[in-house]
Image: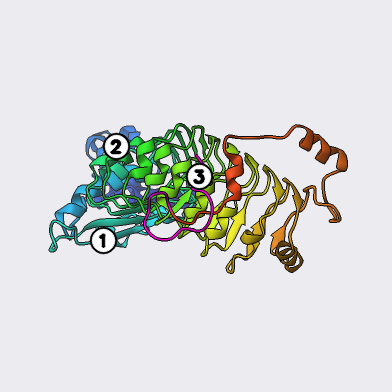
Amino acid sequence: MSTLVYVILTSLIVSTLSCGTNGETLELLIGSRGRGLKNGCSSENHRKYRATRCSKLGDAGAPPAALPVKTEVLVFADQRLASVYPIIQKFKSLVTSDPLGITKTWVGSDICNYKGFFCDSPPDNKSATAVASIDFNGFQLAAPTLDGFLDQLPDVALFHANSNNFAGTISSNIATLPYLYELDISNNLFSGSFPTAVLGMNGLTFLDIRFNFFTGAVPPQIFTQNLQVLFINNNNFMTTLPDNLGSTHILYLTLANNKFIGPIPKHIFKAFSSLSEVLLSNNQLTGCLPSEVGLLKEAIVFDASNNKLTGPLPVALSCLEKVELLNFSGNQLFGMVPEVVCELEKLGNFSLSDNYFTTLGPVCWELFYKGVLDVTNNCIPGLPFQRSVAECLDFIAHPNSCPGMWSSTFISCKAPFSSGPMNPGMAPSS
């Protein structure tokens, strides 16, 4: 039995030592020969030690006091960078999807190394450093708005954000950005009316808002603004093409895949010195093709396919000496395909499919055999893949017409009242 007592005492001694018990307490424990030990520090034998020893045990288990948190001090290369840092961080908090991990690089004071951000000296201070360019193209970021971000970058000159999932409308405050000259927000989820704030931005030369969900009318003023590129295709704009379209300085004009209505303005020839690409396809344009399109001297591409245009094809198209692509497929054009148009030297793609043409001349036949001319689904006798005889007869019995359409059979490669010789024929259609 004594052996058992000593084993128990040994265990209690180890336990007591682990509680921080000193030698004096240990002597008392040993001297008591284990009596009253079942209550540990609460034992009657240790009442005088309870206040000191047990309180120390309690202190030993208390968590250490929290250390003060060190706040990182951000040092920016320029005050202009410091001022946009909270704007960037706020926008970062709005990003709801970032599959490529782009925003993970938007940390710290080195904004110029954030992915998608580019710095340069602003025009008003060559010794300063500022965010001059944003390139989010293809980042696949998603955010409900750009408001509070784009319009709050005072030194930005280029903003490219195509192929993302940005939504909302475009803030009118972008008109206050003094250096912005390229704005590309194409292939996103923007909606609402045309962003009219751009109308007052005289420095803007490149505007690309295609592949969004903008609706309503397009302000006529945009066509006379000092733009070189205007891409507004693949939206839901519904309006007529304004008469002042002929006063444009735009080099690349794409209006395709909207809901534009009415005729192509006859005064479009006023833009003959500048337009190199005109894309009007997949709209609801009506009326005859004006012969004035032949005055677009710089045109390389003219695409008015999939509309409701009618009448004969203007022979004045033969004046387009630089044209490489003509596409009038998917309309209601009829008559003979003009031989002089088929003679254009640089013409490599001439599509007239899904119309009601009835005749080809020798030169056009040659283009057909070369695969340059597509006249599928017309009314040309002897060719495969044409409309049925009944369908062609029905169209001929109910012909479409528009004022002055027969003037399209005459050629004029000079604008009215201009100096210099003119080709034989009438002036452009009235």
Q: Which label number is shown at residue 255?
A: 3
Left or right: 330, with 200 as reference point: right
Identity, as a three-letter code, of the amino acid under mark 3 = Leu
Residue 370: quarter of image: bottom right
Residue 417 is inside the magenta segment: yes
Q: Find residue 60 and report its image quarter.
A: top left
Q: Which residues are magenta?
A: 415-430
**Structural crowding at the residue carrying mark 2, measured as other residues with C-alpha within 10 Å and reported as few (<14), some (14–19) or many (≥20):** some
Q: Is residue 406 left or right of residue 356?
A: left
Residue 334 left/right relative to 271: right
The residue positioned 65% from the left and 41% from the top of the image is 311
Amino acid marked by disc 2: His
**Element type at marker 3?**
loop
In-front residue for pair 154/424? 424
Q: Could you tell me which secondary element the residue under label 2 belongs to?
A: helix
Mark 1 lies on residue:
119
Q: Is residue 77 above or below residue 176?
A: below
Q: Position of residue 223 (x, y in %)?
A: 38, 43
